[in-house]
Image: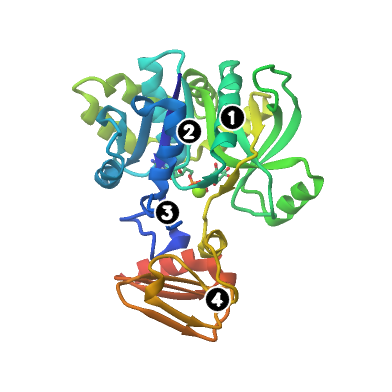
Amino acid sequence: GLWCVVPAGGAGTRLWPLSRESYPKFLLDLTGSGRTLIQSTWDRLLPLAGSSQLMVVTGGAHVDPVMGQLPDLEEANVFAEPSPKESMAAIGLAAAVLKRRDPDAVLGSFAADHIISGRDAFESAVTEAVAVAKAGYLVTIGIAPSHPSTGFGYIKLGESLHQPDAPNARKVTEFKEKPDARTASAYLSTGNYRWNGGMFVVKAAVLMDLLKGTVPALHDGLEKIADAWDTPARQSVLHEIWPTLDKIAIDHAVAEPAARSGKVAVVPATFGWDDVGDFSSLADLLPAEKGEARILGDPNMVITEGQAGGLVIPAGGRPIACLGVDDVVVVDTQHVLLVTTRARAQDVKKMVARVKARK
Ligand code: GDD
Ligand code: MG
């Protein structure tokens, strides 16, 4: 059956100060559901893989909170990285180890920090993706784009694969990671592109073969680590080789080049998907009282009058009052108070850089 890997890295900088390097986005409940993003990811994958086939790759500092939040995650399925090396090293490590445990294994990689609605539609898309992966493709899930975002990968839809157990699957004729604004607009106007949903379903051995052809040094390093993984030499080999690995996203390392040689497929999604990149998109996900701010947290801690379109997050332990300020974002934490507007939500990461520079 399917093995799932959840790469959990990145600091979610645009959601600072709620999300921090020491306590990133995937550890937070951003919907008020009572489950954090990585817990919801786990809940969603469990029916597809079963808990003994769910893996997490995360930074050494996040292993304890991740295991605390996911009590059924098995220790053998936790991969601790010595340092962040981006998504290719994280997913590739899981693939290289898995390939040794099960040569025919199909691996699904699912981001730790997305919000997805429509459980049945999600499961049927992944089931189709698994069927296509068995035929040797690197399979993506395509999200219908709503605006010309420059923060996503873009997938150009090709012809149907005509695979009976995956009737919606299509070939991908181009994969372009994070195009510039002009290119994104041009793609959108053709109606023939989907956003890459950040999910990849592929045979572990196929992924490693693709990587061997595109970034051989990274492939070789990961294979050496995997050779030592289930031996007493694991830690010494890991700490020797990991710092030398290329820092590259799976999208650039494998998806873009593999699409050029016709090895990428896509299953268009019919479920709801959001990557909650910034406070403005977070606000859109929360219920709104007419003409008042949206609130993440305890509504008793917030008093507003005339704050249409805004977002208030009272996570600092004290009440927040807002009067007559539209589209304002107020995020209070024990460390920092952030006040900004929804229009500038994308720029919050610039402030993080400035705060870091001050230290
Ligand atoms: N363990 C680990 N270590 N995980 C990492 C690391 C790392 O160093 N870097 C990134 N990740 C994880 C993230 O936590 C996330 O689950 C996944 O890998 C993707 O990384 P992001 O940094 O969130 O990528 P992105 O959002 O810029 O772009 C990707 O996702 C988009 C959809 O949200 C790409 O796949 C795009 O094509 C896609 O559209
Ligand atoms: Mg992301």
Mark toward the viewer: 1 or 2: 1
Which secondary structure, mark 1?
helix
Q: Are marks 2 and 4 in contact (CB under 8 Å)?
A: no
Task: Please report whichever mark, 3 or 2, sits nearer to the chain's N-terminal start.
Answer: 3
Tell me the distance, in whole angstroms, between the alpha carbons under discs 1 and 4.
Answer: 38 Å
Instruction: Check disc 1 and report the residue beneath it.
Output: 124
Q: Position of residue 47 (x, y in %)?
A: 45, 29
Is the residue 348 above or below the residue 203 in the image? below
Q: For numbered disc 3, what is the local secondary structure?
A: loop
Q: Quadrant of the C terminus?
A: bottom left
Q: Earlier in the sequence, mark 3 or mark 1?
A: 3
Position of 58 with respect to 108 (left or right) is left
User: Label 2 CB, ligand 1: below 8 Å?
Assistant: yes
Q: What residue is shown with label 2?
A: 109
The residue that appears at 48% across and 33% down in the rendered structure is 109
353 left or right of 179?
left
Q: Which residue extends farthest top?
A: 103
